[in-house]
Amino acid sequence: MTASLLIAAGVIAVLILLNAFFSAAETALTGASRARMTSLEREGDGAAKRVNALNEDRERMIGAVLLGANIVQIGASAIAASIFVGLYGDLGPLITTIVLTPLLLIFGEVGPKTVAITFADNIARFVAGPVQWMVRMLSPIIISVQWIVNNTLKLFGVSVDENVDVLSAARAEIAGAVELHAEEGGVEAETRHRLLGALDLSELTVADVMIHRKAIKMLDADVPPREIIAQAMASSHTRLPLYRDDPENIVGVLHARDLLRAVSEHGRDGFVIADVMRAPWFAPMTTSAEDQLAEFLRRREHFALVVDEYGALMGLVTLEDILEEIVGDIKDEHDIAVQGVRPQPDGSVNVDGTVPIRDLNRAMNWDLPDEEAVTVAGLVIHEAQAIPEPGQRFAFHGYRFQVLRRQRNQLTALRIEREPDREGMDAG
């Protein structure tokens, strides 16, 4: 009898170890770094290749692991119950539950999962081979289980979407990791802004980053060459749109380098502007910032005019404008510093209405929403559902706004400050 009990106890111990293997395998394979596994696979690591292959059909992999775990748990419970029923009679099931539950929980679930989370990449590579073999062996059973589960869910109106947007999920995963490390102090604020800015490009359109047409410096193509030279020299920009008759009628783009070459070859009055200007490039305002960046790089151009669906000029966008969404404001020795954000001694901030919300958030480390409006003035008008008068005050999104100046239908200056409870919450 003693030998039989020892054998049964040994079998239970083996089954608990198998359960530990399945628990660790599930946690490690689902938690392994995709980037690291892909990098190792490219270097010829066969184990990493198996991890990637398993994660390509994660549902089947998890199904195989859970099936194995359930089999060993049921087996351990059945053997333990037979032992304790033989020893204690009707109390056997109760004693089985009391004894086996903590053993499975500690040694078969929590312990292995904790280790697997800590060393996910290494453990995933170690267990990938046996799990891959299990998936192949249990494939018919897993397919049947998946079919039953999917059709059962459909009865309750739950549709399993097989066309998951992997790219979007990957971006969300990366953004979450950046935010987590930033909160823990592992990523500096500037680095956080750059990483999140790069990820946000796909969610921004050209309209979100463009310079509005009212702020564009244009040149009249019909004025004498000397006047064109004078206006171009007075500008801080190297590329200037040229119009004829009407500012909406853009006929070309003047590059400072081309102008300098023409003056050098033909003198101040000897060149024809039509021979110097370049053809304008028009981009729809609905183009994503990510796609526009790709087009800039592909065409090797840095400047595009932005138009709406009717072809009307809305603004212009440059390569620098898009890069600034990633790295922040870019200044060189020729830039004119326009102070649109002016912190005050009392903790408030005076802001020009045309300042983009994203720029203000970066400058002040704020989190004003930019989904419904691009500029600070646009946000206030959107929330107020009207064009406020100077002196009016508003409070929303944890901030207080006061309109300082209004010019016709434009809010040109505002004062913004955090609400006191918001400051205390952020400081904590």
Image (tube, rainbow, N blue to C red):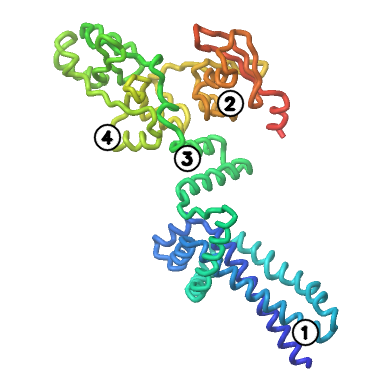
Say which mark, if any, is on residue 299. Answer: 4
Disc 1 and disc 2 in contact, CB within 8 angstroms:
no
Nearest to N terminus: mark 4 or mark 2? 4
Crowd class of label 3 (few under 14; some 14 to 19; many from 20; radius 10 Å): some
Q: Whole-Å distance between the Cαs marked 2 and 3?
A: 21 Å
Q: Whole-Å distance between the Cαs marked 1 and 2?
A: 68 Å
Q: Which residue: 53% across, 17% down?
A: 377
Residue in front for this viewpoint, 346 or 21: 21
Disc 2 and disc 3 in contact, CB within 8 angstroms:
no
Q: Amino acid at mark 1?
A: Ile
Crowd class of label 4 (few under 14; some 14 to 19; many from 20; radius 10 Å): few
Q: Which residue is mark 2?
A: 364
Q: Nearer the viewer, mark 3 or mark 1?
A: 1
Q: Amino acid at mark 2?
A: Met
Q: Whole-Å distance between the Cαs marked 3 and 4?
A: 22 Å
Q: Whole-Å distance between the Cαs marked 3 and 1?
A: 59 Å
The local secondary structure at tag 4 comes to helix
Nearest to N terminus: mark 1 or mark 2? 1
Q: Which residue is mark 3?
A: 199
The image quadrant of residue 427 is top right
The local secondary structure at tag 1 comes to helix
Placement of 236 over or under 45, stated as above or below: above
Q: Nearer the viewer, mark 4 or mark 2?
A: 4
Disc 3 and disc 1 in contact, CB within 8 angstroms:
no
Q: Whole-Å distance between the Cαs marked 1 and 4?
A: 77 Å
Say which mark, if any, is on residue 83. Answer: 1
Q: Which residue: 31% across, 36% down?
A: 297
Q: Amino acid at mark 3?
A: Leu
